[in-house]
Image: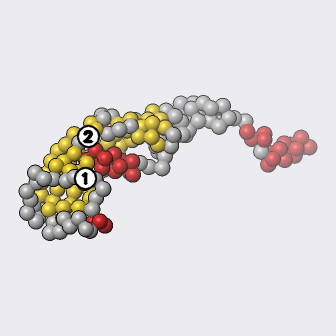
Amino acid sequence: MTSFSLSQLKLRPGEEHRDELEVELPAFEFGGERYVPVPEKVRTELVVTRANTGVVFSLALAARLHGPCYRCLGDAVLDVPIRAREYQATDPEDEQMTTPYVVANRLDVSAWARDAVALALPDKILCRPDCAGLCPVCGKNLNEEPHTHAEEQADPRWAALETLRERL
Ligand SMILES: [Zn+2]
Ligand SMILES: [Zn+2]
């Protein structure tokens, strides 16, 4: 777990402290599938700014996840850029103004980064935005083998045309 100790921080209001940390991300379960961060350890920029009544934390990282495409089950790679912000009030009475990631004067950067990535995931993870998916009839990958089946015959409008044609 990567965390950042706040007790070492000697900042006056308006001053900031920048740090680069290596944060290990876990694999994400999403829609019943597993998405693995590559690389597992991402370089993360943390900026801590002292305000008059508390501390502002800013987190920036770029995660990359590998896993199956929602439509075709092929390999999908998803870039997840993260910019997040948390605030911790100096007055501990002010519970509305505290971040859950500060525990015992340490900022849990790992938990924050993990949650931020999980929140930033799209509805569907696709290998490409226009992925054609799998054929609903035969199950083949429509990206590799674009095809259609002779479903027209099942369409009643075509059946009506067929009857017309027979009469002619
Ligand atoms: Zn796909
Ligand atoms: Zn097919």
Residue 7 image offset from top left, x and y in percent: 13, 53
Residue at the spot of label 1: 103
Q: Nearer the viewer, residue 55 or 96?
A: 96
- The residue at the point 19 percent across, 43 percent down is 21
Residue 92 image offset from top left, x and y in percent: 23, 64
Q: Label 2 amino acid?
A: Met
Q: Circle 2 sits in a helix, a strand or a loop, which is it? A: loop
In the rendered view, would you say 23 is above or below 52?
A: above
Category of crowding for the residue at label 1, using alpha-carbon neighbours closer than 10 angstroms: few (below 14), some (14–19), many (at least 20): few
For the residues marked 2 and 1, what is the alpha-carbon distance in whole angstroms? 13 Å
Residue at the spot of label 2: 1
Q: Label 1 amino acid?
A: Val
Residue 60 image offset from top left, x and y in percent: 25, 50
Residue 14 image offset from top left, x and y in percent: 11, 65
The answer to whether mark 2 is within 8 Å of ligand 1 is no
Q: Residue furthest right?
A: 167
Q: How many marks?
A: 2
| Direction from residue 127 to residue 166 in the image, left or right | right
- The residue at the point 53 percent across, 30 percent down is 144
Q: For residue 17, which quarter of the picture?
A: bottom left
In the rendered view, would you say 115 is above or below 145?
A: below
Tell me if residue 135 can be seen: yes
Q: Circle 1 sits in a helix, a strand or a loop, which is it? A: strand
Q: Nearer the viewer, residue 26 or 135?
A: 26
- The residue at the point 78 percent across, 39 percent down is 153
Tell me if residue 77 can be seen: no
- The residue at the point 88 percent across, 44 percent down is 163
Category of crowding for the residue at label 2, using alpha-carbon neighbours closer than 10 angstroms: few (below 14), some (14–19), many (at least 20): few
